[in-house]
Amino acid sequence: MAYMYLGCLVISIGMLVWLKIFDVRKSVIQYLNLVCLILSSFGFYFVSISRTLEEALFAQIISYFGGVFLPAFYFFLVLEICHFELSKYIKVLLTLFQGVVFCLVCTIGRSEIFYKSATFHVINGNLVLDKVYGPCHTLAISLIYLYLLLSFAVVIYVLAKKKSVDRKNAIALLVLMAIATVVYAVEKIFGFNYSFIPVAFDVLMFGALIPIYDSNIFTVYENQNIIDEQLESIGFLTFDKKKVYKGCNDYMEEIFPELSHYRLGQIIRNCSDDLQSIIDKISSVEEEYEKSSQQEHVHLPIKAFLLNERYYDGMIHVLTNPFGKLKGYTIELVDDTEHYKALELQEKYNDELAREVDEKTRKIKSIQEKTILGMAQMVESRDLSTGGHIKRTSDVVRIFADKLAKSDLGLESRFLELVIRSAPMHDLGKIGVDDAVLRKQGRFTDEEYEKMKEHSEIGYHMVSEILSGVEEEDFVRVAENVAHYHHEKVNGCGYPHGLKGDEIPIEARIMALADVFDALVSKRCYKEAFSYEKAYEIIEKDSGSHFDKKLADVFLSCKEELEAYYNAN
């Protein structure tokens, strides 16, 4: 039996590795389930190879870590997959209660409240514990069945009431829980010498990996808050590679109310002509994907259409796994009514409504800037180490620009305003950096760092393509330089081109100070936040090597304003 438990341990570790490779959501609950499973399997294996009662009891306590916490964490996992909201405070209380139960488990061998007594015998070289259970053991068993019943109740409820859950995934969870319950009950009723609980746990989690992966890759909730806050008018609709409906956000349901009648896991049929025409475009994206050498970047524009007196246009993107394999599609729609109404007014009224067209054009530019900001913050939502960096660096550039305008460096206010407008775009190139690098928790390897450095070149080309022909040339040039050269150093040791001194555009030298200062005083996954004094000390020390000395002197004169800003935020 030791080999069976060892096999369960290897399988559970393999599942953790699998989740690490294919995970796109970074769910703590998913990882906690697998960690508990690994500890439980290790405990059972350790019991079977123990040679003394003391060793066996210690190993039994380890195995109970999974037995106590896994039912609760699996219940939380069911809630997550089924999009069923439960207060985080309740989750914390339930976890703390399970912790109390585990403390009772830790009394094994020291008191009679969990095990009244324990002896052992050996069968085929494997140690088997003979236990007489105490009163608290009944509590632990009752909690396991309670969480199973709660999980059953949640799945049955969402099957009956919610269309935003894939029925196949929900039914799979029901079947897996039923199997685990039967195995556990049979073992307790017949009192086998060996426990099959690790096998049941492995089957439960192994079968749940598909619903977990499906729920993670097709979720439309990860970026929804950023989009709603920035634009309030972007809809998302996702399909798998077989064009099976996998979900949409609330705004997409406002555009196409008929989507509320479809369940996840269905193929959408008999829908409106507008919706069907968009779904049909997926075939074109699939053809482009098969032809493209950079398959993860394949997308297809959606030509503007009129629906309920609103104009919509957008894009269809491919969804891929970390190995570039096609998994599905995301349809993105944007309400661009103001833009098209402005064009209609221009065609219809010409000179008579020129002033109104100018006003509409300003609104279009505002929408464009918000779109760029939304793109930048969506990139930031993928980078787990830089939350809020875009907004803070933009505000720091504004504070810095106010000081520069009053300095004797001769910088024009119009130029400084262009630098302020360009600041949110400085890291836009990270959209082209692989998730495995961008979302890494910890320091980069040399190879990963080289991949991350590519974002400045990518950002330069993206800014150029987005703004050229739309914005004035001066703004395009400043924005390109900010994205391209903000990691250059005046001593020539920066990247991407190793420029020195005045070879680096002054707008990039300004951005470098704001970028580095925020990185210093902000907490990152690989470091704690530095004090203001430490940050100023580093900037002063690197003045003339990393930073332009004259600019650094002006920046250090902003101490009072910078500290007031960061303390308020």
Image (cartoon, rainbow, N blue to C red):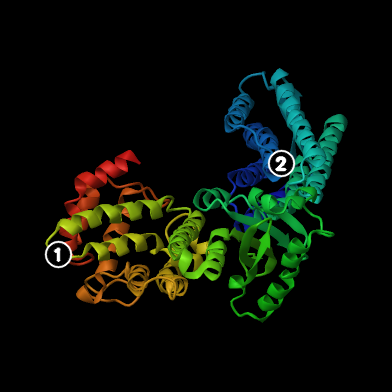
* Mark closer to the chain start, 1 or 2: 2
Relative horizontal placement of residue 20, taking residue 1 as reference (left or right): left
Name which residue type carries label 1. Answer: Leu
Please identify the residue farthest to the left as the structure is shown. 408
So how many labels did they put on this image? Answer: 2
Report which quarter residue 100 is drawn in. top right
Q: Dot 2: what SS?
A: helix
Residue at image location 50% in from the left, 70% down from the top: 350
The residue lying toward the viewer, choosing from 373 and 487, is 373
Q: Dot 1: what SS?
A: loop
Q: Quick check: can you spot residue 241? A: no
Query: Which residue, given by chain and number where applicable, does mark 2 sit on?
Result: 78
The residue lying toward the viewer, choosing from 254 and 528, is 254
Instruction: Measuring from the top left, give residue 114's x and y in whole percent.
Output: 68, 22
Name which residue type carries label 2. Answer: Val
Above or below for 97 versus 296: above
The mark found on residue 409 in the picture is: 1
Question: Which image quarter holds the C terminus?
Answer: top left
The residue lying toward the viewer, choosing from 78 and 124, is 78
Report which quarter residue 59 is drawn in. top right
Above or below for 491 versus 119: below
